[in-house]
Amino acid sequence: MNPSQPNPTRPVRAVPVAPRQRWWAKHVVDKDPAHPRLVLRWGRILTAIALVGLAGYLSLATALWGYYSIYRKIPGVNWVDVAILPRFPRVQAAIGASYYADARTLWDKKQFVPAIFTARAAVGKSPGNLEARLFLAGCWQQAGRPNEAIRTLTDGIAFSAEDTRLQGMVVGLCLETSHFKDLLKILREDFPTHGVHLLDGKNRVYQMAEVRALLETSGAAEADRVAASYPGLKDAPSAAPLFAGIDWELGRHDAAVARIRTALERQPGDPGLLDADVDMALRAGHTDDARAAANRFLTAFPNLLSAQLKFLDAHGSRQGADSRLWTAECARFLSQYRHQPDALAQLSSLAASQGWPDLAFLLYQNSLQENLTGFPFAIYYAGSLVKSGKLAEADAVWRDLSLRNQPQIASAAYIAAMVDWGTGRVSEAMQAIDQLRRENADDPHRRRVIEGVFRSFGYTQLADQFAKGHS
């Protein structure tokens, strides 16, 4: 070894310095070859994400709770109900209850449109709130929108099918507004779909409702057939007026009168039977019996609207002794119901069917002065002129209405048909009949009503022509 030569030095390997560690990652130095490698701390990352998400969710829940309970001041909204999703329907129920209370307050203040919209919001927030649903249906009914009222109630069947209030209101409303096809669907499909069978057992009210709907849509024979499937229904006194009407349409006139008399013997003070007794006597042309029955009815129920109307109908000749009695009762009626448009409309309808143009004109003028719905009263006035044979006056009134209310009078095309027919405009009358056929092709009840109007007004040829299109 030469000492004069320097010793060879070994190369020094540089050891990489690991970067500073992070909470979300760490660097691992591999040995061969030596270089750092980044490794994510997924456990910490996911935990952090979960904590941030939870904090954000709780913040949003708190903000939403503050919005409802502090800003909107809706009672009954709890923070835990907002934060825990399965409990959130309780928040919706609280909001719906608040809207319902606001809607009632608005309605009491006679702010009807805002009340209806608020009630709709209440039902939308809480579909199971039956009180709000019944209130909304009642509002629609009072606003003259029966279709909306029925739809509101039928939508509630999915939530409250077993509630007797909903059952009674939807069935009663369909009967009152002549929605007989809807009634049959409700009784036979909607309620049974949700496990409620209203037609089973001995519930006479709903069985009678079905029979009445069948009478109006399918005829007396079908109604009589279905009624026979309910044992004891025909013998119930409360069902006597209904089955008397079926007997009458089937040509069993004596049986119809006898059915009412038998039921009255069992329940002599029943207002429905007393009403039917007057009606059957009038149908049979027994005017003396009708007067006597109407006197009994009015004596038993002096302030009942139907009793007063039946009394005026029975004494409708307005001749001899009838004149004094009719005038006195009519004056009392007008005084009692002068601010009730529904009652006045029923009296005006009676005036049209009986041919009392003086009374119909008085009611029409009163409707204008009292800011009532004047147009239907004008139709009743025109109808009374037709019924009384004053066709020239009816033609003038109808032409005047046509000039001012052309879109609206389309709903009373049967009046136009009778006016045209009576004044010799046969082709125009037949055009009106064709229009009525098209408009009522899917409404058997409406067809029955129109045909009945033609016959009761003495226009049997028009009734026959109208019926031909649906035979």
Image (cartoon, rainbow, N blue to C red):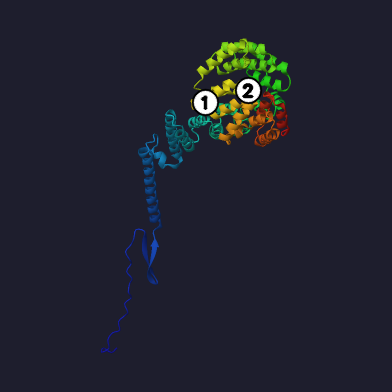
Could you say which disc has been placed on residue 186 in the image? Answer: none
162 horizontally vs 76: left or right:
right
- Mark 2 residue type: Ser
Residue 261 position, x and y percent, is 67, 13
Q: Secondary structure at mark 1?
A: helix
Name the side, left or right, on which 83 lies relative to 364: left
- Foreground: 237 or 53? 237
Residue density around tag 2, few if under 14, some if 14–19, many if 20 or more, within 10 Å: many
Extreme residue in the left direction: 4
Give the numbered dot on residue 353: 2
How far apart are the two marked residues, 1 and 2, measured between alpha carbons? 19 Å
Q: Quadrant of the C terminus?
A: top right
The percent position of residue 23, horizontal first and vertical second, equals 34, 58
Residue at the spot of label 1: 367
Disc 2 on helix, strand or loop?
Answer: helix
Nearest to the observer: residue 356 or residue 336:
356
The answer to which quarter of the image holds residue 186 is top right
* Residue 467: image location, x then y, percent: 71, 31
Image quadrant in which you'd find residue 187: top right
Q: Confirm whether residue 109 shows in the render.
A: yes
Quarter holding the N terminus is: bottom left
Please tell me whether residue 319 is drawn above or below residue 214 in the rendered image.
above
Instruction: Name which residue type carries label 1.
Output: Ser
Q: Residue at x 52, y 25 (%)?
A: 367
Q: Quadrant of residue 87?
A: top left
Q: Earlier in the sequence, mark 1 or mark 2?
A: 2
Position in image of residue 25 (x %, y %):
37, 61
Q: Residue at x 39, y 56 (%)?
A: 45
Q: Is residue 194 visible?
A: no
Mark 1 crowdedness (10 Å alpha carbons): few <14, some 14-19, many ≥20: many
In the image, what residue occupies the spot 36% across and 62% down? 26
Left or right for 304, reference 212: left
